[in-house]
C-alpha cells in the first residue's frame, strides 16, 4: 500500500464513520456558497475584453476610446421604411421624445436630422447637382407657392392641373418632370390605396428629382444612454424603455417605419440573452441526460441519486469559486457549468462502479467504500490534475476569455475531486445498497477484438494528418453572433446601406491638418474606398454654390414667406376636387401619365364610393409630409459659408477630440468578411498609420493572439500532463500508451473540422487542449487498472465506467450544441466530436497497443 492509498483509506474511513455530520456540513456549506455565488457573480459580453489589455492593438483601441468616449456603450436606433419623408418625420418625432429624458437616453445624435445640414444642404451637393436642382425649383416656383398655401388634396389637384395646362401651352416648356414624376408617383399611391396597401408620396424625392415611389430608406440615431452597471443587463432598462417609446409613438402605424436596436449595448444585451437562454436549455438537457445515463450505467437509483447530489453540490461550490476567483463570467467561461456537469460525474461513475464491484465480491458497505476509494482514488487524483492542467494551460496566454475559463474549470476539477471523495462516500454510507455482480464487457484475452479496429482507427488518424494544415480559423467575432437576432440583422442592414459599417479603421491623428494630410495619403491606397477626416465636412466651391443658391432664394423666398398651415379639406371639397380633376385628365390632349392617373382615380372612386374616410386617408398619403419638406426647403435658402468652427459641436466632437487630436475614418473597397482582403486592407493602412485601430485591426490581431494562445496552451498542456504521468508511472511506455489514443483523436478531430467545414473560432478553440486534459482521464483509468487487475482492465468495471463517463460528457457537450448562440453551439459541436473520437480511440487504439506493449503489473 502506497502513501496515497493509505491517505485515501484514512480519509474515506473518517467520512463514512461521520457520514451524518459530513452530509449536514456539506448541505449547509452548499447553501451558503450558493447564496454568495448568486449575489456576486456577473457576466461581461464584450468580446474585446476577452483579450489582454496590454496588447499593442488593444492599447491603440483604448486610446481611441479615451479620445472619443461618445463612441463607447452606444445604442443605435435603426429606422427603416419605404418612404423617405415618413422615415424623416419618424426620426424627428423620436428624437424629440428622446430629448425629453436625457437622464435615461443621454446624448442623442441624429446626423441626418441636424438643423445644420437642413440649412446648408445645398453646399454639400456637387456643382452640377446644385445647378440641376435650382433649375427644377425655379421652373416649379409657381406650383410650390400654390402648394405652400394650400397643402390639401384639392390644392394638390389644382396644382397638378396648372402644371399640365402650362405644359400644354408650350410657351415656357414647363416639364411635368419639374416635380420629379409627380403624376406617376400619385398614381402609384392611388393604386396602392385600392389594393389596401399603405403607400405615401415622397415629396423629398420629388424635390430632389428622384423616383418618388417607395424605396428602401434607412436612418440611424445614436444614443449614449445611462447604463445600470450594477445589473446583470446594464442596458436592459433603457432597451425596454425604448421599445415602449416606439409603441407609444406608434412608429409603424403612423409612419410605416420599423424601429430596431443595434450598437454595442443592444448587441451585448441580445448576446447575453442568447447565451443564457442557450445554456439554460443546455443545462436542463445535460442534467436530464446525466440522470438517464447514470440510471442506465449504474443500474441503481440510490447510486445514481448519490452521484447527482454530489454533482449539484460540486457545481454550486464551483460557481462560488468562480465568483471569488474571477468575479465576472465572459461568453466562454459562462459554459463552465455545463462543462462541470459532464466532467465531475466522470469521477462519480468510476467511484460508484468500483464500489458496486467491491460489494459484488461480498464486502460490507463501509469496507467496500474504503477499498473502492483507495483503489480508484489514485486514478481520480491523476485524472483531476491532468484535466486541470489542460484547463490551466490557457492561464499564461493573452486570451483572457479562455484563461478565465481555465481558472474556473481548473479549480472545478479539484472541487469535483473533493466532492466525490467527501460528499459521495458520505451519501453512499447513508444510502446502503445490496451487493451485485457488475457486468463486464470483455473477458481476459479480449484484446484480440481491438487489434484490427484499433489499427483502422490509428491509420485514419495518421492519414488525417495530411488535412491538418487545412484547418481553418474564423477570426470574425460577428460570426459568433446570431444573425437572426434584431441587433445583428439591423447592423448588417446598415452595413449594406452605407458601406463599411463596423468594418472600418479609425486613426487618431495629432491635429486637424495632420488628419487631412493622412486621409489624403490613405485614400490613394488600392484597398481603400475612402478616407475621411473633419476637413471633408467642409464643402468645396462654397462661393460659387452660394451664388447659385442665392438665385433660387430670389425666386422662392417670396413664395415661402408666410408661415405654413397644416390643414385638411372637407370631404365635400375633396370629392368635388377629385371629380373635377378626373374630368380634366380625361381630355384627349393630356399625356399618357395623366390618362393613367385618371384611370386610377376612377377605380378608386368606384371601389370606395360612400366611404369618405378612404378619401381622407388618400389625402394624408399624398400631402401630409408636404409641409415638412417645404419648411426644409425654406431653411435651405439660408445657407452660409462653412468652416470647421461653424460645424455644430455635436458633429465636431465626433471628429476632433478635446485635446485637439482628430479622427480619420478609413473604409475598405473589398468585402472584409474575406480573411485575405481583411489582412491586405489592414496591412496597407498600417503601413502608413501603425497606430490604426478599429474592428478590422482587432479581428486580425485577435485571431493571431487566439491561435498563438491555442498553440501555447496545447504545448503547455502536453508537456505538463506528460511530466505528471511520468512522475506517477515512471514509465515512458505508459506515457506512450496514454497519449497515443489522444493524438489519434486530435488528428481525427481536426480532420472532421476540415471535411465538415467546422472552422475553429474564439469559442471552440478550447477543444484540443481540453481533449488532452479530459480525454487523458479514460486512458489513465484503463492503464492503471491494467496494472492492478489480475484479469486485465477490459474484464473489470473500468471499461463500463469509461464508456458511461464519456457518454455523460458527450451528452453535456451535445446539449451545448443546441444553444441558439452560434459561438456556444460551435463549442458544443466540436467538443462532442472530440470526446466521441477520444472514446472510440481509447477503446480501440489503446487496447490494441496494450496487447502489443503490455504494461507491468503492480505488486
Image: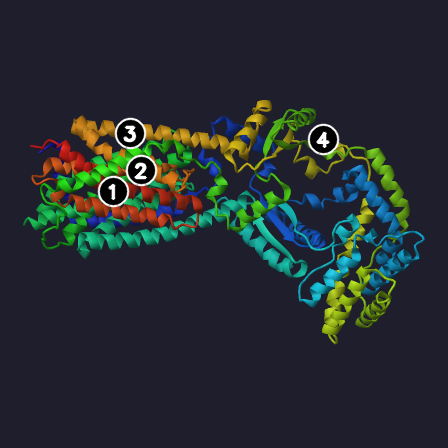
> Looking at the image, is mark 3 or mark 4 earlier in the sequence?
4
Q: Nearer the viewer, mark 4 or mark 1?
A: 1
> Looking at the image, is mark 4 or mark 1 earlier in the sequence?
4
SS for dot 2: helix
Q: Are marks 1 and 2 in contact (CB under 8 Å)?
A: no
Asked whether residue 151 appears in the rendered view, the answer is no
Which residue was labeled with disc 3?
A: 718
SS for dot 1: helix
Badge 3 density bin: few <14, some 14–19, many ≥20, Cα 10 Å: many
SS for dot 4: helix
Question: Which of these two is toward me, 307 or 587?
Answer: 587
Badge 1 density bin: few <14, some 14–19, many ≥20, Cα 10 Å: many
Which residue was labeled with disc 2?
A: 748
Q: Are marks 2 and 3 in contact (CB under 8 Å)?
A: no
Residue at 57% from the left image edge and 23% from the top image edge = 687
Q: CA distance from mark 3 to mark 1?
A: 19 Å
Residue 839: mark in rendering: 1
Amino acid at each position: 500500500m502506497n502513501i496515497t492509498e493509505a491517505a485515501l483509506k484514512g480519509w474515506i474511513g473518517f467520512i463514512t464513520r461521520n457520514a451524518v455530520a459530513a452530509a449536514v456540513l456539506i448541505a449547509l456549506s452548499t447553501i451558503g456558497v450558493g447564496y454568495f455565488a448568486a449575489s456576486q457573480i456577473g457576466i461581461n459580453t464584450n468580446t474585446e475584453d476577452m483579450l489582454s489589455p496590454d496588447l499593442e492593438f488593444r492599447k491603440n483601441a483604448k486610446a481611441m476610446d479615451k479620445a472619443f468616449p461618445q463612441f463607447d456603450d452606444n445604442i443605435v436606433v435603426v429606422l427603416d421604411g419605404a418612404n423617405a419623408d415618413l422615415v424623416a418625420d419618424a426620426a424627428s418625432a423620436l428624437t424629440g421624445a428622446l430629448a425629453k429624458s436625457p437622464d435615461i437616453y443621454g446624448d442623442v445624435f441624429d446626423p441626418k436630422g441636424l438643423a445644420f445640414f437642413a440649412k446648408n444642404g445645398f453646399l454639400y451637393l456637387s456643382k452640377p447637382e446644385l445647378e440641376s436642382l435650382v433649375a427644377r425649383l425655379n421652373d416649379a416656383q409657381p406650383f410650390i407657392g400654390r402648394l405652400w398655401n394650400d397643402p390639401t388634396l384639392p390644392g394638390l389637384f389644382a396644382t397638378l392641373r396648372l402644371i399640365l395646362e402650362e405644359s400644354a401651352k408650350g410657351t415656357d416648356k414647363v416639364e411635368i418632370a419639374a416635380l420629379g414624376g409627380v403624376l406617376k408617383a400619385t398614381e402609384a399611391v392611388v393604386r396602392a390605396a385600392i389594393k389596401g396597401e399603405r403607400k405615401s408620396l415622397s415629396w423629398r424625392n420629388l424635390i430632389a428629382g428622384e423616383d418618388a415611389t417607395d424605396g428602401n430608406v434607412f436612418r440611424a440615431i445614436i444614443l449614449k444612454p445611462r447604463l445600470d452597471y450594477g445589473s446583470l443587463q446594464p442596458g436592459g432598462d433603457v432597451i425596454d424603455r425604448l421599445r415602449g417609446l416606439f409603441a407609444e409613438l406608434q412608429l409603424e402605424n403612423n409612419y410605416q417605419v420599423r424601429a430596431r436596436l443595434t450598437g454595442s449595448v443592444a448587441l451585448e444585451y441580445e448576446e447575453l440573452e442568447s447565451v443564457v437562454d442557450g445554456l439554460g436549455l443546455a443545462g436542463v438537457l445535460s442534467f436530464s441526460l446525466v440522470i438517464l445515463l447514470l440510471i442506465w450505467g449504474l443500474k441503481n437509483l440510490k447510486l445514481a441519486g448519490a452521484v447527482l447530489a454530489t454533482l449539484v453540490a460540486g457545481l454550486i461550490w464551483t460557481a462560488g469559486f468562480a465568483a471569488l476567483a474571477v468575479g465576472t463570467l465572459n461568453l466562454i467561461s459562462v459554459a463552465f457549468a455545463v462543462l462541470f456537469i459532464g466532467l465531475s460525474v466522470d469521477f462519480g461513475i468510476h467511484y460508484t462502479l468500483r464500489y458496486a464491484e467491491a460489494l459484488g465480491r461480498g464486502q460490507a458497505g463501509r469496507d467496500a467504500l474504503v477499498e473502492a476509494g483507495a483503489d480508484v482514488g489514485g486514478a481520480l487524483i491523476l485524472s483531476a490534475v491532468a484535466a486541470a492542467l489542460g484547463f490551466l494551460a490557457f492561464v499564461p496566454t493573452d486570451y483572457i476569455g479562455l484563461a478565465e475559463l481555465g481558472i474556473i474549470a481548473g479549480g472545478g476539477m479539484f472541487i469535483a475531486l473533493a466532492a466525490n471523495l467527501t460528499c459521495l462516500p458520505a451519501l453512499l454510507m447513508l444510502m446502503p445498497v445490496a451487493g451485485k455482480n457488475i457486468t463486464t464487457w470483455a473477458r481476459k484475452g479480449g484484446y484480440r477484438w481491438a487489434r484490427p479496429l484499433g489499427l483502422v482507427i490509428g491509420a485514419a488518424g495518421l492519414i488525417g494528418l495530411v488535412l491538418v494544415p487545412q484547418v481553418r480559423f474564423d477570426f470574425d467575432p460577428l460570426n459568433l453572433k446570431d444573425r437572426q437576432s434584431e441587433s445583428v440583422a439591423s447592423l448588417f442592414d446598415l452595413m449594406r446601406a452605407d458601406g463599411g459599417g463596423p468594418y472600418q479603421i479609425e486613426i487618431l491623428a495629432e491635429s486637424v491638418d495632420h488628419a487631412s494630410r493622412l486621409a489624403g495619403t490613405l485614400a490613394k491606397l488600392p484597398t481603400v474606398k475612402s478616407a475621411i477626416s473633419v476637413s471633408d465636412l467642409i464643402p468645396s466651391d462654397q462661393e460659387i454654390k452660394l451664388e447659385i443658391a442665392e438665385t433660387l432664394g430670389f425666386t422662392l423666398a417670396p413664395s415661402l414667406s408666410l408661415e405654413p398651415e397644416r390643414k385638411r379639406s372637407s370631404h365635400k371639397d375633396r370629392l368635388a376636387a377629385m371629380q373635377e380633376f378626373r374630368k380634366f385628365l380625361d381630355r384627349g390632349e393630356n399625356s399618357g401619365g395623366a390618362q393613367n392617373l385618371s384611370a386610377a382615380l376612377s377605380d378608386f372612386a368606384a371601389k370606395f364610393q360612400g366611404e369618405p374616410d378612404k378619401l381622407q386617408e388618400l389625402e394624408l398619403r399624398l400631402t401630409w409630409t408636404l409641409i415638412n419638406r417645404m419648411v426644409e426647403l425654406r431653411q435651405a435658402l439660408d445657407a452660409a459659408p462653412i468652416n470647421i468652427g461653424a460645424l455644430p459641436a455635436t458633429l465636431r466632437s465626433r471628429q476632433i477630440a478635446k485635446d485637439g487630436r482628430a479622427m480619420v475614418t478609413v473604409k475598405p473597397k473589398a468585402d472584409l468578411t474575406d480573411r485575405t482582403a481583411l489582412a491586405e486592407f489592414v496591412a496597407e493602412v498600417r503601413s502608413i498609420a501603425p497606430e490604426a485601430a478599429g474592428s478590422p485591426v482587432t479581428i486580425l490581431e485577435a485571431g493571431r493572439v487566439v491561435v498563438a494562445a491555442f498553440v501555447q496552451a496545447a504545448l503547455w498542456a502536453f508537456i505538463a500532463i506528460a511530466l505528471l504521468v511520468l512522475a506517477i508511472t515512471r514509465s515512458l511506455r505508459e506515457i506512450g500508451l496514454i497519449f497515443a489514443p489522444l493524438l489519434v483523436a486530435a488528428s481525427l478531430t481536426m480532420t472532421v473540422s476540415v471535411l465538415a467545414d467546422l472552422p475553429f473560432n474564439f469559442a471552440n478553440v478550447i477543444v484540443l487542449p481540453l481533449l488532452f486534459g479530459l480525454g487523458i482521464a479514460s486512458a489513465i483509468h484503463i492503464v492503471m487498472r491494467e496494472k492492478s487487475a489480475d484479469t486485465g482492465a477490459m474484464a473489470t468495471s473500468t471499461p463500463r465506467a469509461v464508456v458511461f463517463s464519456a457518454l455523460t460528457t458527450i451528452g453535456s457537450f451535445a446539449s451545448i450544441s443546441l444553444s441558439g448562440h452560434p459561438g456556444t453551439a460551435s463549442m458544443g459541436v466540436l467538443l462532442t466530436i472530440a470526446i466521441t473520437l477520444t472514446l472510440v480511440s481509447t477503446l480501440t487504439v489503446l487496447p490494441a497497443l496494450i496487447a502489443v506493449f503490455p504494461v507491468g503489473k503492480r505488486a
